[in-house]
Every structure is written in C-alpha cells, then in structure tokens.
Image (cartoon, rainbow, N blue to C red):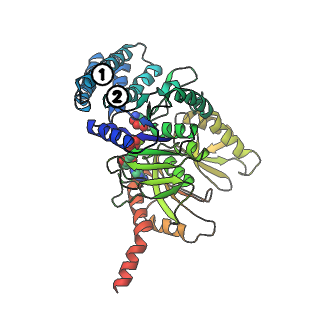
Amino acid sequence: MQVWKFGGTSVGKPERMHSIRNLVTATTGRKIVVLSALSGTTNALISISESAKANNVAEVEQKIADLKAHYDAFIKELYQTEAGLQKGQQVVESEFSYIRSVAKTRPFTLKQDKEMVAQGEIMSTQMFEAYMQEQGESSVLIPALDFMRIDADGEPELEVIEQLLTDMLAPNADKQVIVTQGFICRNPRGEVDNLKRGGSDYTASLIGGAIRAEEVQIWTDIDGMHNNDPRIVKRTFPIRELNFEEAAELAYFGAKILHPSTITPAKLRGVPVRLKNTMEPEAFGTLIANQTTDREIKAIAAKDGITAIYIHSTRMLNAFGFLKKVFDIFEKYKTPVDMITTSEVSVAVTIDNDTHLEAITAELREFADLEEHDHNLSIICVVGEFKADNEGIALKVFDAMKHIPIRMISYGASEHNLSILVWTKDKAAALNALNERLFYYEDAMKDIFSAQ
Ligand code: ADP
Ligand code: ASP
Ligand code: MG
C-alpha cells in the first residue's frame, strides 16, 4: 500500500480535486490519501479564532461568511450531479454551523482554537470523499481523530497509531482508496490537537511508517526538493535523489516543502518518500531513501526566527558539569538547541522558540555570565555528503559569504551539514551568493576557459 498526501494548493481548486481523483485511480494498488485543507483555509480559520478571542462578533460573522462563500462556489464546480452537489451542500452547511458554534464558545481557549483550525482538513476530506462516491469510486473516509495520537509532549505515538490504524483498515480491505485528514490528531486529554503548521506531510509519513507502506508520496506545487529556496533564489533546480539524513537536515533547517519532522518515521521504518508535483505529474520529483547521488553539495536551506544566547562560565568551560548544567535548563523548558559553538570559557547556543527565554536566561545567570542575546537571526544550512577527507567545501562556502557578517559556524557534527548563523536581513544575499558559488561557479569557469 502507498500513502499519497496532497497539500493545500493541490486541493485548492475544484479542477485540482478532479485531477487528484484521476491521479489516484490511474495507477493500480491501494492507497491511503491524506489531504490538507484548501489553500488559505487554515489561515482563515486562525483569523476567525483571533476575532473570536477578541470578542469581535461582527468581524467573526464577516470572516465566516467570506469563507463560506468560497466553499459554496467551490462545491458548485466540484460535483457533476445534483445528488453530488446536495451531499456537498450538506457537508458545507453542517461544517459552517459547527464553525459558528465554536466561534461563539466562551471562554474561547486553546481548546476552541484547535477545534477551529482542524475544520479545514475535516471539510476538504469530506468534500473529496463525497466526490469520489459521486464518481462511483471504491473509496472510504477514515477520521484521523480516531487514530492519530500525540503524547503530553506533542510527540506522535507511533505504536498506538499503528495499532489503531491497523484495526480501522481491516474492515476496509476491499476499498482501493482510503481518505483521511492530514495535520489533525488527538492529545492525551482526548482533545482535538494538531501536528503544527504544515503538519499534513508529517501525518503522511507517520501513516507510512505505521503501516510500513511501500512508499509515501508528497504531492505539492513544485517538482520536488530544489537545491535552494525558490521563493528567494532565482536559479534553482530539483534534486533527483537525497538520502534520509540529507532530507531531514533540509526539512529541519527550513526547506518549507517538508514539515521538519516528516523524515523521522519514514527513516525509522525504511519507507521511501517521493516528492511530486500535482501540476506536472510526469516530472521525476525527488526520491528520498537510503541512496544518494555523488554530488558533494546537494542543497541549501534557511531557517528564520533564531535567537542566539551567549553564556560565559565564571570558571573554565571544561570545569566538570558546566555544559550539563546548561543543557539541563534547556531540557527543563523543553526548548531544543539548534546550533552550539564553544571556546575555552564560553558557549553560544541558538534556539528557534523563545517562549521560555526569560526563564531560561534567569536560571543560567545563577551560575554563568550572559551577554545580551541576539534576535532576528537565520541559520543557513548547506547540506551534502561531506566525507571527513573532503577538501575545499568550507573554502567555497566562506568564499561565497565573504561580504556577509557571520555570527556562528557549525561543521563536523554530521557528514551532512554545515551551518552558518547570519542576520536575517542578510539571508537573501547569503542564499543567492552561495547558490552561484556552489552550484554554478565551476560551470561558469569551465565555459570561460573553453571559450579562450
Ligand atoms: P503544500 O501546501 O503542498 O504543503 P507548501 O507550500 O507547504 O506546499 O510547500 C511547497 C512550497 O515550498 C513550494 O511552493 C516552495 O515555494 C517552497 N519551498 C521552500 N524551499 C523549497 C525547496 N528547497 N524546494 C522546493 N520547494 C521549496
Ligand atoms: N492545513 C495545515 C496548514 O496549513 C496543514 C498542512 O497544510 O500541512 O498548516
Ligand atoms: Mg506544506
């Protein structure tokens, strides 16, 4: 069995939903189809929640009416029969009356927030399943809320998911297509929760891992993982093959095409992940598995919203237990550290979530001196196969970055990652300079010399 996930733009227009039906039924083999919300819906639901929290009733009404108008128009083009349209209308009417009732709940807490944001995936899957039924396809909808579980730390419980999903799939063995929601799950209190923004990719790989799928396919609006961020850099190209480690580094360090945790369950269970373009299904895309190509430098990604904390030991850094005390504090506040550099008496670390920054720095000050921390930083991550005996990779990277101030450097922790911390205002310049130097410079040089 394969797991195919379609993102927001891939379900965002009625004709795209028609294409999804064609794609999933064109090839043989049973599939679990994971859908995101229609593009724009998750943001619209978050905005409704904000107005509800602010108790702005008129704004809530207006935002709900605007979103509903979009769905009313959408279903008119999605269905091809009167019966199909009626079913679609039932879905939209009952969903919007639920959205209204959630928006009216007081107090409007995190629980309502999460209920609200879940409705996007609940609507898209119900609409798609009704379309599959209208077209006479062998398909069934299984609710993700019945099997997707996270623990108290927000981490998915793969074994529980596996058990629940296996039980739910058993009675549907005759169905060719099993439709379910991306992104949404339940927490240990039994409440509706989610896997964070962009989480539908993660749903797909969790399902793929749980059922030990043949392959997970992530269908989106671009022909695979590109060598650099196509929103910022002009000349980029798709990478045909990546291994799990390289893809995980890219996803974690900012390549938006994949939710940061997507690779973990796939790698754990050895399930290949293929990235495909819904708008150009014949394009090869990217295959993520155990193999890789021999190109040394594969890709560059960047992650924003980074804070750097500079910690000075009042004694020498290698005094026993100093680093342990530092990291115990980050652990206590469940705040992951991304980059670390050390000197004789200092350690600098970066975090991408400063919710507990005040508490963390207060505890650090009990045994260390802290410099003023920096915000508005970005980590630039160069990913590839950097064998220990490689020559010249760092030279190329720093040659490209020679005009850009660098705050921190991290290299050598894995064979796949060289990370550089820069001010976010310099990110675009850094990505473009690295792109030209690492991917086009040698070819350009060859052209110059062969022309002479
Ligand atoms: P979906 O809605 O299908 O989940 P996303 O918007 O989350 O799609 O991810 C696809 C987008 O990721 C692309 O349109 C592209 O702009 C962006 N992106 C950022 N970095 C990369 C990269 N390295 N390779 C491909 N796409 C990238
Ligand atoms: N709809 C969710 C979001 O916009 C999840 C996803 O699309 O992956 O973040
Ligand atoms: Mg996405």
| Residue at position x 37%, y 31% in the image | 42
Q: Is mark 1 within 8 Å of ligand 2?
A: no
Using a 10 Å C-alpha cutoff, classify the residue at mark 2 as few (fewer than 14 neighbours), some (14 to 19) or many (20 or more): some
Task: Examine the rendered structure and indicate whether residue 424 appears above or below residue 108.
Answer: below
Q: Name the residue tied to disc 2.
A: 133
* Residue 309 visible within the image: no
Residue 406 location, x and y as percent? 49, 58
Image position of 262 (left or right of 140)? right
Q: Which residue is drawn at 75% across and 44% down?
A: 321
Confirm whether residue 339 shows in the render: yes
Amino acid at the residue labelled 2: Gln
**What residue is shown at x 37% (from left), y 53% (from top)?**
223
The kind of residue tagged 1 is Lys
Query: Are the residues at dot 1 and dot 2 in contact (C-beta closer than 8 Å)?
Result: yes
Q: Where is residue 3 in the image (x, y as percent from the top left)?
A: 48, 40
> Toward which corner of the image does residue 418 lie, by quadrant?
bottom right
Question: Where does the C terminus fall, quadrant-wise?
Answer: bottom left
Earlier residue among tags 1 and 2: 1
The crowd level at tag 1 (other Cα within 10 Å; few <14, some 14-19, many 20+) is some
Residue labelled with disc 1: 87
Whole-angstrom CA distance, mark 1 to mark 2, is 10 Å
**Front-most of 135 and 347?**
135
Secondary element at tag 1:
helix
Please say if 287 is above or below 119: below
